[in-house]
C-alpha cells in the first residue's frame, strides 16, 4: 500500500469516527431537548434536587449560629413537632397521591401540551413531597430568628421554587392551538420576579421578628403581593381573550379565584402568628392545610378542568387520518 493511499484511508477512518462521535453527541443533545420540551417538570426537579442538597447542607451549617430564646425550653419545640408531625405526614401522603395523578396525566393524556402542564404540576407536588418528608424525618436542624423564636425556613425555600411554577401553569392554560406553551414570557417573568421578591421579604420579616423594621419589611412584601395578584390577573385576562371555548374560560377563572383565596391565607396566618393569636402548633397546622390545598387544586384542576380541548381534538383527528 502506498503512503498516499494509507494517509487517505487514515483520514477517511478519522472522519467516520468523528462523524460517529458527533452523531452521538447530537442524538444526546436532541434527547435532552426533547425531554425539556415534553417533560419540563421532570428536568426541573432533577436540577432542584441538586439545589436542595446544597440548601440542606447550608441549613446544617447556619444552625450552629442560631440559638433559641433564653428560657425557651427545647422541649416546647419537641411538643410542637409531635403535634404537627401527623399533619405533615398527612400532607406528604396527599402530595404522594397528587404525584400519582400527575404521572397518570403525563402517561395517558392525549394532548402533548397538557402533558407538559401535567409535568409542571408534578414538579410542584414532588418538591412539596420531598420537603414535607424531610421535615417529618427531622432532616433540618432547628432554626431561630434574631430573638430566638423558631422559624421553618424550608417552607420558604419550597415556596420560592413552587410558586413560580404555579404562575407558569396559570400562564400555560387557555392557549389552545397555539404553538408555544407560554405565549407571553415577559409578563410571566415579571410576575415571577415580584413573587420571589415578596418571598424574600417575607423570610426577612421572619428572621428579623416583630419589631418596627420587621413590620416595615412585611409591608414591602405585602406591596409585592398586590403586584403579583395584578400580574396573575393580567396573565389570566390575556388567556381568556385567546381561549377557544367558554369551558376553558370558566375553568381558568375558577382556578384564578381559588389561587387568590388560598394565597391570601398565607399572609393572614403570618400576621396572626406574629400577633400571638396563633401559637406555633396552630400556625404550623393551618399553614400546612393551606399549603396542601393551594397546590393540590392545580392537580385536580388539570384532571377535571376543560383545558386544551382543541389540542386534544386536533390530536385525535390527526391520529384518525393516519390510521
Image (cartoon, rainbow, N blue to C red):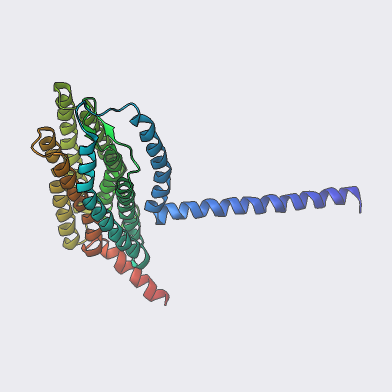
Image quadrant for the C terminus? bottom left
Q: Nearer the viewer, residue 223 or 111?
A: 223
For this orientation, the residue located farthest to the right is 2
For this orientation, the residue located farthest to the left is 277
Total count of labels: 0
Picture quadrant of residue 62: top left
Task: Tell me if residue 174 can be seen.
Answer: no
Task: Tell me if residue 60 can be seen.
Answer: yes
Picture quadrant of residue 314: bottom left
Q: Nearer the viewer, residue 47 or 23?
A: 47
* Residue 91, above or below 139: below
Q: Position of residue 31 (x, y in %)?
A: 50, 55
Image quadrant for the N terminus? bottom right
* Residue 321, above or below 103: below
Q: Position of residue 264 (x, y in %)?
A: 13, 43
Q: Nearer the viewer, residue 194 or 308?
A: 194
12 left or right, relative to 68: right
For this orientation, the residue located farthest to the top is 212
Q: Nearer the viewer, residue 277 or 11?
A: 277
Picture quadrant of residue 161: top left
Q: Position of residue 252 (x, y in %)?
A: 18, 55
**x 42%, y 50%: residue:** 43
Q: Position of residue 181 (x, y in %)?
A: 33, 52
Amino acid at each position: 500500500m502506498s503512503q498516499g493511499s494509507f494517509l487517505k484511508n487514515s483520514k477517511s477512518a478519522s472522519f467516520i469516527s468523528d462523524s460517529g462521535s458527533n452523531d452521538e453527541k447530537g442524538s444526546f443533545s436532541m434527547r435532552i431537548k426533547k425531554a425539556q420540551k415534553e417533560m419540563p417538570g421532570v428536568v426541573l426537579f432533577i436540577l432542584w434536587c441538586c439545589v436542595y442538597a446544597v440548601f440542606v447542607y447550608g441549613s446544617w451549617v447556619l444552625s450552629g449560629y442560631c440559638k433559641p430564646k433564653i428560657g425557651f425550653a427545647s422541649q416546647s419545640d419537641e411538643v410542637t413537632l409531635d403535634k404537627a408531625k401527623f399533619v405533615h405526614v398527612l400532607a406528604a401522603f396527599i402530595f404522594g397521591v397528587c404525584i400519582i395523578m400527575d404521572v397518570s396525566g403525563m402517561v395517558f393524556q392525549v394532548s402533548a401540551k397538557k402533558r407538559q402542564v401535567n409535568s409542571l404540576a408534578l414538579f410542584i407536588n414532588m418538591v412539596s413531597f420531598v420537603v414535607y418528608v424531610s421535615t417529618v424525618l427531622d432532616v433540618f436542624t432547628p432554626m431561630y430568628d434574631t430573638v430566638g423564636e423558631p422559624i421553618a425556613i424550608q417552607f420558604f425555600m419550597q415556596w420560592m421554587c413552587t410558586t413560580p411554577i404555579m404562575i407558569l401553569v396559570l400562564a400555560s392554560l387557555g392557549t389552545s392551538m397555539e404553538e408555544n406553551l407560554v405565549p407571553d414570557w415577559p409578563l410571566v417573568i415579571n410576575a415571577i420576579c415580584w413573587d420571589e421578591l415578596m418571598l424574600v421579604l417575607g423570610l426577612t420579616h421572619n428572621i428579623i421578628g416583630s419589631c418596627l423594621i420587621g413590620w416595615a419589611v412585611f409591608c414591602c412584601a405585602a406591596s409585592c403581593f398586590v403586584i403579583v395578584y395584578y400580574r396573575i390577573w393580567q396573565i389570566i385576562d390575556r388567556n381568556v381573550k385567546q381561549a377557544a371555548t367558554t369551558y376553558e374560560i370558566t375553568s381558568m377563572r375558577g382556578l384564578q379565584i381559588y389561587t387568590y383565596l388560598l394565597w391570601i391565607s398565607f399572609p393572614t396566618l403570618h400576621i396572626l402568628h406574629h400577633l400571638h393569636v396563633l401559637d406555633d402548633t396552630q400556625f404550623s397546622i393551618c399553614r400546612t392545610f393551606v399549603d396542601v390545598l393551594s397546590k393540590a387544586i392545580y392537580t385536580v384542576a388539570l384532571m377535571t378542568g376543560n383545558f386544551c380541548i382543541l389540542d386534544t381534538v386536533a390530536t385525535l383527528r390527526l391520529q384518525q387520518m393516519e390510521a
